[in-house]
Amino acid sequence: MEGCSKGGNWVSGDGVRIIFWPCPRPPSSPPAPPPASSSSAAAGSSSSSSATTFIRPSFSCPREEAVEDDDEEDLVRRAAAPGLHGRAEAKAKDEPLRIMIAGAPASGKGTQCELIVEKYGLTHISAGDLLRAEVAAGSENGNLAKEYMTKGLLVPSEIVVKMVKDRLAQQDAQENGWLLDGYPRSDEQAQALEVAGIRPNLFILLDVDDEILIQRVINRRMDPVTGKIYHLLYSPPENEEIASRLTQRFDDTEEKARVRLLTHYSNVDAVVGVYKDVMQHVDGNRPKLEVFAEIDKLLMDLQKKESEESTRRNSPSLPTTSKQDNWKGIPTKLNTTPHTREIREYFYKDVCNATKRAVENKITKLKVKIVIPELNPEMDVYRIGTLLELMRELAFTFVNDGKRVRVCVQGAMGEGIFAGMPLQLAGTRQMLERMDWGDDEVMGTFVNFGAVGAKEVKPEDDMFILMCPQNAVGNCIIDDLKAMVEAAGDRPVIILNPRLKDLPGSGGNMQIRGREERMEFADSFFTCYHFRLLYQSGTQYPILGALRMAYPNPYEIYKRVDLSNRKEEYILLDTFNEEPTRSEIGDAYYGRPRKDKNAVPEGIWGFFSRVLG
């Protein structure tokens, strides 16, 4: 299997069928591994013998064997022992490791922190532990926090941020490197660390299936005598005496665990934009030592990279140029086209993640609006290839979950010599069909193509993705779109970059009959992703800022700021729960206070409002 470049099928030892296919680039997230041996079951994973997994490999194919239980002790000795790649090497580097780690409750984050600290000697910092220690020590920060805690209030972010900053500035963290556990949890906290110059060179995110997490939580128990943690399924008590005295945390219930999961996902979504360029997803469904083996490789690779970069910096004979600028929150150099692969991948992943979250929350009528230069048909740098790539990535997001996706492009509208279609869509159906969609079993089974209309909806389809449905001069696509949505029922319909405003017909006249109903239907699609650049009115240069919304987060207004050395960055100015108006965007950009929408206007209009109100 190693080094395989062709698609095909593979069946694991326990009968799970895996379909994989070649990929023109590395996938946006690591593929799920084959089900492991009995040690995987001990970690809370489960599988069905009839299950099918879909994998788009990047540089290697699925492993043919899992780590055996007999090798586990040997693995932990080799992984945790400070040797050639251990603690001594970490300390020898000019730049110590700076690591952030995040994971849902019961994801095994605490265990991984212990293993990382044991091998690499990093200073482990948990915001919760730090807060309690500061309060107990009676420090200035602790006393400030205690005032809020005694009143039952949340400690303000600025106090916690100050504690973390002060702790990271201490000698042990500076010399040994640091491991920041479960922090930051909001964009505000992340931006505060950025301003202070505190930035990780690796952000580890442990991914564990929700149902596995729930099972880990609700079966967790504690011995009040020894403080030892047990699990009723995977690590039961040694005898009946211990079993009889075990207690359960009050919040280790399924209902509260799901609430904590939602909080975790909200926290991750809040900071992912800041750390996207240094973030690595690690599959946490596996046994702890397999998980640590992957983390260990990431850290060793990072040490090697840091060492090579340090050598280049200190060598007068080698240039210190970089392939790309690191961006925080939003990619930079968006006015440079064609966009780099890194920029396109940022937006592909941003769109796919937001759309998947909306679908998982049972929203069935979804709209994606993304207008970057390469996806703006009004600009001369518009590239249909970028749009087609985005369509494919969005489809694969759901195909990887076993969904059958129908990708749709509207056909010609009108009759006879008046038949035609929007120029933006001309020829795109043929290009989509000729693209690389992987293995033959994917095409025709999990990915099918169609047009827009009720007759395109088939019983076997799980969802529908429509590329740029739009009206043309004298013709309206909305009736066909509405019929298709009704035929789809409760199956998701996702429209990408729609243009559903009425266009004039012959003689420049607008079609008035039924217009209100058509616009009401067009507006009924829920926006799960929105991104557009901000310019001066009537221009497309220079870029002043950006408006972004990725479900379930609010709309964010960013300002583009020029830095020295011809660099730039985007600074978050304000957030809105609904799409902001032009005046609200202008107020945020120029620092004016936000207006109360219910306030009575001043002047003559205010007079009439009071008289007629």
Image (cartoon, grey):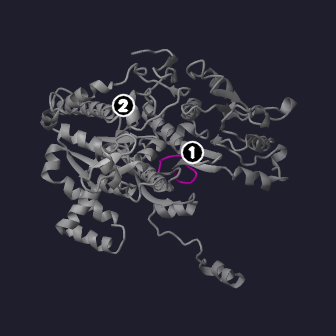
Judged from the image, the secondary structure of the residue bearing numbered disc 2 is helix
Crowd rating for badge 1 (residues with CA inside 10 Å; few <14, some 14–19, many 20+)? few
Quadrant of the image for the N terminus?
top left
Corner quadrant of residue 300: top left
Crowd rating for badge 2 (residues with CA inside 10 Å; few <14, some 14–19, many 20+)? many
Q: Amino acid at mark 2?
A: Ser
Q: Residue 100: in sight, yes or no?
A: no
Q: Is residue 130 left or right of residue 328?
A: left
Residue topped by disc 2? 39
Q: Any magenta on residue 369?
A: no
Gap in angstroms between the C-alphas marked 1 and 2: 30 Å
Q: Nearer the viewer, mark 1 or mark 2?
A: 2
Could you tell me if the residues under marks 1 and 2 are in contact, i.e. CB atoms within 8 Å?
no
- Disc sitting over residue 499 in the figure: none
Question: Looking at this rendering, what residue extends furthest in the bottom direction?
Answer: 611
Sequence-first disc among 1 and 2? 2
Q: Is residue 131 left or right of residue 559?
A: left
Chief secondary structure of the magenta portion: loop
Q: Is residue 495 above or below residue 155?
A: above
Q: Position of residue 517 (x, y in %)?
A: 79, 54
Q: Residue 386: in sight, yes or no?
A: yes
Judged from the image, the secondary structure of the residue bearing numbered disc 1 is helix
Q: Amino acid at mark 1?
A: Glu
Quadrant of the image for the C terminus?
bottom right
Q: Position of residue 583 (x, y in %)?
A: 56, 63
- Towards the viewer: 314 or 217: 217
Question: Looking at this rendering, what residue extends furthest in the front direction?
Answer: 240
Q: Position of residue 348 (x, y in %)?
A: 51, 37
- Disc sitting over residue 360 in the figure: 1
- Towards the viewer: 170 or 61: 61
Tell me where the magenta segment starts and ends, as one range. Answer: 534-543
